[in-house]
Image (tube, helix red, strand yellow):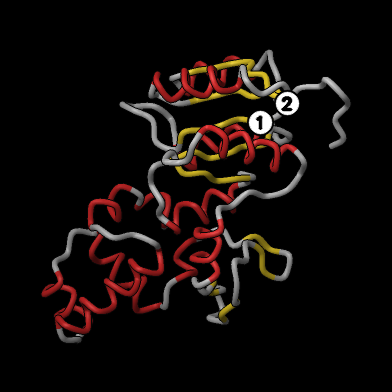
């Protein structure tokens, strides 16, 4: 997109932390090419606003409080209704599996909440220009995760499409055994029960579980359960 002299990038914010919204609003006033046109703490407020208004870029908090619609479900709903809206995902969580799923769902950029305001506006400019924004450290880690197609073939690199078809399930990242072990674990089975079921040692089952979680970019059982619906 070509912008003309004096034309501003219009930005809308969704974040349930008032100080983060206020900080970005105040910082934007120092950038002549930025204009915050909407700022919301609840997803239903944003969705209602978007019915009558437009913006170039949405800075979207991945995790909202309470019973809010958030995460991948919110991303998909927004883009199904407003496909031209460019989304910059903002989160303190750096699960590679969730970040990859968000890009597969259509976001244009990801930024950590630990970044300074200047980095946010640099990211906004990048995705407004039509490019994808991923911090170098995240892109490097994503490139290490093999993408496994349904037929078992492995694709190298940070790919989100294979043979023109979108890879829509994150369990394509895992080997069949890793996926089976993690599914059993999510169903409430203990390692010893899974070992008995699959006729493997507890050490082997634990190894499959840990390697699977590593590929998904998760470090704790709490994260695994929290994002189970997004991952599988």
Residue 125 pos. (x, y %): 70, 37
Q: Is residue 227 left or right of residue 61?
A: left
Residue 197 pos. (x, y %): 19, 78
Residue in the picture at 38% in, 30% down: 64
Which label number is shown at residue 9?
2
From this view, report whether residue 71 is shown above or below residue 150.
above
Q: Is residue 104 left or right of residue 9?
A: left
Which label number is shown at residue 104?
none
Instruction: Pick the residue in front: 169 or 57.
Output: 57
Q: CA distance from mark 2 to mark 1?
A: 8 Å
Q: Are marks 2 and 1 in contact (CB under 8 Å)?
A: yes
* Quadrant in which the C terminus is drawn: bottom left
Q: Give whichever of discs 2 and 1 has the lower sequence position.
A: 2
Crowd band around label 2 with a 10 angstrom C-alpha radius: few (<14), some (14–19), many (20+): some
From this view, report whether residue 19 is shown above or below residue 190.
above
Circle 1 SS class: strand
Query: Where is residue 35, by image quadrant?
Result: top right
Instruction: Pick the residue in front: 193 or 23.
Output: 23
Circle 2 SS class: strand
Q: Which residue is mark 1?
A: 57
């Amino acid at each position: 997109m070509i912008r003309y002299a004096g034309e501003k990038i219009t930005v809308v914010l969704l974040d349930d932390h008032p100080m983060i919204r206020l900080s970005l609003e105040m910082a934007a006033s120092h950038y002549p090419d930025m204009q915050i046109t909407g700022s919301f703490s609840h997803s239903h407020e944003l969705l209602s606003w978007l019915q009558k208004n437009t913006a170039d870029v949405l800075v979207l908090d991945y995790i909202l409080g309470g019973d809010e619609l958030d995460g991948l479900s919110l991303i998909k709903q927004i883009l199904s209704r407003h496909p031209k809206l460019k989304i910059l995902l903002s989160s303190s969580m750096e699960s590679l599996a969730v970040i990859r799923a968000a890009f597969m769902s259509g976001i244009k950029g990801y930024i950590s909440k630990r970044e300074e305001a200047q980095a946010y506006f640099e990211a906004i400019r990048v995705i407004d220009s039509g490019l994808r924004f991923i911090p170098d450290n995240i892109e490097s880690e994503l490139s290490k995760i093999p993408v496994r197609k349904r037929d078992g073939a492995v694709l190298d690199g940070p790919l989100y499409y294979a043979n023109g078809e979108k890879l829509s399930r994150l369990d394509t990242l895992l080997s069949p055994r890793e996926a089976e072990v993690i599914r059993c674990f999510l169903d409430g089975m203990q390692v010893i029960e899974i070992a008995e079921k699959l006729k493997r040692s507890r050490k082997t089952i634990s190894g499959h579980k840990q390697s699977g979680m590593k590929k998904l970019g998760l470090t704790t059982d709490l994260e695994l359960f929290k994002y189970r619906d997004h991952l599988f």
